[in-house]
Image (tube, grey):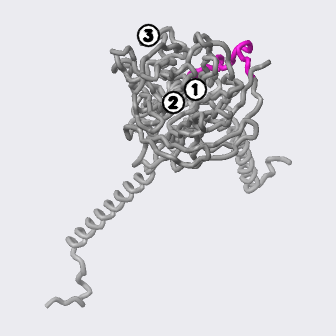
Amino acid sequence: MKDDSDPTKSPVTRRQFLRDGTRVAALTGLGGLIGLVAGRSSAQGTVWQIDPQKCVRCGNCATHCVLEQSAVKCVHGYAICGYCQLCTGYFEPEPNDLNTGAENCLCPTAAIKRTYVEDPYYEYTIDEQLCIGCAKCVEGCNRFGNGSLFLQVRHDRCVNCNECAISKVCAGDAFLRVPASRPYLLKTISH
Amino acid sequence: MNDENLSRRQFINQSFRSAGLCVLSGAAAAAPGVALHAAATSATSPFAYDVDRLSRIDPKLLVYEQIRKISGLGAEPRRIAIAPQNRLYVATGAGVDILDGEAGKVAEIPLSAPAQCVAVADDGTIYVGLRTHVEVFDAKGKSIAVWEAPTEKAWLTGLAVGANDLFAADSAGRVIYRYDRSGKMVGRIGEKNPDRNVPGLIVPSPYLDVKLGPDGLLRVNNTGRHCVEVFTANGDLELSWGKPGLAIESFCGCCNPVGLALLGDGRCITCEKGLPRVKVYSADHTLEAVVAGPEQFPDNGRPGQNSNRRDGTLGGLDAAVDSSGRIYILDLVAGDVRVMKRKS
């Protein structure tokens, strides 16, 4: 029969102590890891985005992003586009001719591709590798057309700065934090 | 006071005060600097889209003057029409506003859905185009009938009425429907038909309009081709005129003109968006005068205006002419009517 009252005997063996210690350490580490992940996901719960209804197309997105090439890009709402032959987002205000000659094009980096669909419709596609987010095409499209071209922060590029450098100088106060689960503010129209 | 006599506590206190003042003054200096920087950047943007020089109209062409402005219209006004008694009818998001040229709004016809366009027959019958149908009212505003468009995808944006016909412009279908006065559809006008030499209507945005001239011919704005096309009531294309461009004699942007009105002698009034301009073309289709230019509609030409409207329009103008030749310009953004009279 075991004598528990013997003060000379330790209640916990070395093996038990090491086993319990390892468990506690593992649980502590796991808890810390869960806390860290939870904390980070909370911090990244929102991301920067541009409200296209507030954007005034000032050009600051192209010049004030901390990235060498801005994380703001022009995006195209095809459902709104008129597929115009004379696209005012593609052509200079007074083009010499309606062709793809550089002298006729509005985009300073030739980031808009014009593709013939059928007479007299053309499709316009943004090459995001070339787009610098200057909003020149957005201005042309909004002034004369349906406003299908608009700016958005692209989250495959944006580093989600705590204080966005563009938002500090945004002339239209159009930068806002949106849920990371719904990171884009796309333009829609009722027809 | 000699600095060497400072106690340690005094020295630390003074240091903290100095640092606090520095931080405070720095913040005060930086705050307006940011705002100024934003303004300066936007004003001197290397990416500016500049068409402001085209906003100025040659004063020699401006032969009309504004004599009145009528405000207080319903939300989201869209089209204006005039009745034989010179009563004005404005299609709005809430129904139809009936205006007197002198007294302003005198009555309204409320509707459950936004009115897109309106026309009034000689007998006072009022035709209101909603998105997919035409509602008919008698001269007192009592509902008489509802005429459905042939498709649920219709987007009616213009009406014209004659002695025997009603013509309804469908922007979505890119076609003009011809109804008889009993509501039976008897024809389709403007659809692409190479056999009849009709190139087809191009309508990038919902502004297709139709007007019936005293010569019995229809004027239709083919906005995507930047021209006005003239059709017979049977759908034969008689001619088209107009060309794209920002110059004053041309139609600007991607899709103009957005509205038409006819003077009794065959001259045509055109309305443009982007560069909001109302112009008069002579019977041989040369520019005769400018009724109003961009400087008179500062908000209308601002990009993005009205981008939350339910009818898909971003601005623009519409016009109607009364029997004395006065031109009534509906500003879709400002929501008012300018009464323009030719200068004596």
Reading the image, the residue beneath label 2 is: B207
In the picture of the structure, the residue carrying the numbered disc 3 is A101
Label 1 SS: loop
Q: Above or below — where is B337 with respect to A22? A: above
Q: Which residue is painted at 73% across and 56% down in the image?
A: B9
Q: Residue furthest top?
A: A96
Q: Nearer the viewer, residue A170 or B136?
A: B136
Task: Report the Cα–Cα distance between label 2 and label 1.
Answer: 10 Å
Assign the magenta stretch its main secondary structure.
loop
Q: Residues within 10 Å of mark 2 (few under 14, many from 20)?
A: many
Q: In the displayed structure, would residue A172 be above or below residue B284?
A: below
- Give percent across and percent down for residue B237: 44, 16
What's the residue type where badge 3 is placed?
Gly
To which residue does mark 1 refer? B273
Q: SS for tag 3?
A: loop
- Which residue of the protein is positioned furthest toward the right in this rendering? B1
Is B52 positioned to the left or the right of A149 in the image? right
Please report the residue visible at 70 percent of the width from the left and 45 percent of the height from the top.
Answer: B106
The amino acid marked with disc number 2 is Tyr
CA separation in Å, label 2 and label 3: 30 Å
